[in-house]
Amino acid sequence: MSDPHAPTTVCPMIESAMGVLGRAWAGAVLQAMLGGSERFSEIRRAIPGITDAALTTRLKELCERGLAERAVEPGPPVVVRYTLTGAGRDTAPVLDALRAFADRHGDLLGRG
């Protein structure tokens, strides 16, 4: 039987996931894209306070990590769309769980 007081080993998979999902604005960008936003301007409008530079950086990182894809439709006018991959869509329950946590424990997060 295991000792309930023994130190727990940190899960490297959780640390790795938080390294990507825990970046500034990453959750908000994913949430906007899960809500149907695809174009840069749509995503920016869905996230009050995000700068163009921050959004550009997050979208680039999400694409590099395989959570989103960037597609350029030749024009005129040229249209750039960002869509979630299967892995990106798999973040939905994670974001839902974080939202539920924040709803229950907003006081711990400096809200309320």
Image (cartoon, grey):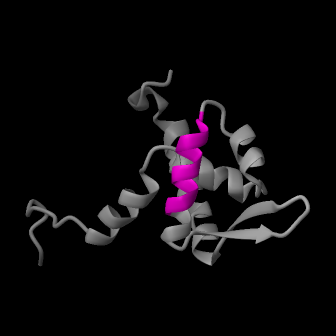
Q: In this rendering, is residue 11 above or below 102?
A: below
Query: Left or right: 52 with respect to 105?
Result: right
Which region shows up in magenta? Answer: 50-61
Query: Left or right: 65 with respect to 52?
Result: left
Query: Left or right: 110 with respect to 92?
Result: left
- Which residue is drawn at the image coordinates 48% and 31% (left, top)? 106
- Which residue is drawn at the image coordinates 82% and 69% (left, top)? 73
Query: Left or right: 64 with respect to 79?
Result: left
Q: Position of residue 32 (x, y in %)?
A: 69, 50
Identify the residue at the far top of this view. 112
Quarter of the image for residue 93 reads bottom right
Quarter of the image for residue 44 reads top right
Give the main secondary structure of the magenta stretch: helix
Q: Position of residue 60 (x, y in %)?
A: 54, 60
In-front residue for pair 108/47: 47
Can residue 65 be seen at all in this image of the molecule? yes
- Which residue is drawn at the image coordinates 89% and 58% (left, top)? 77
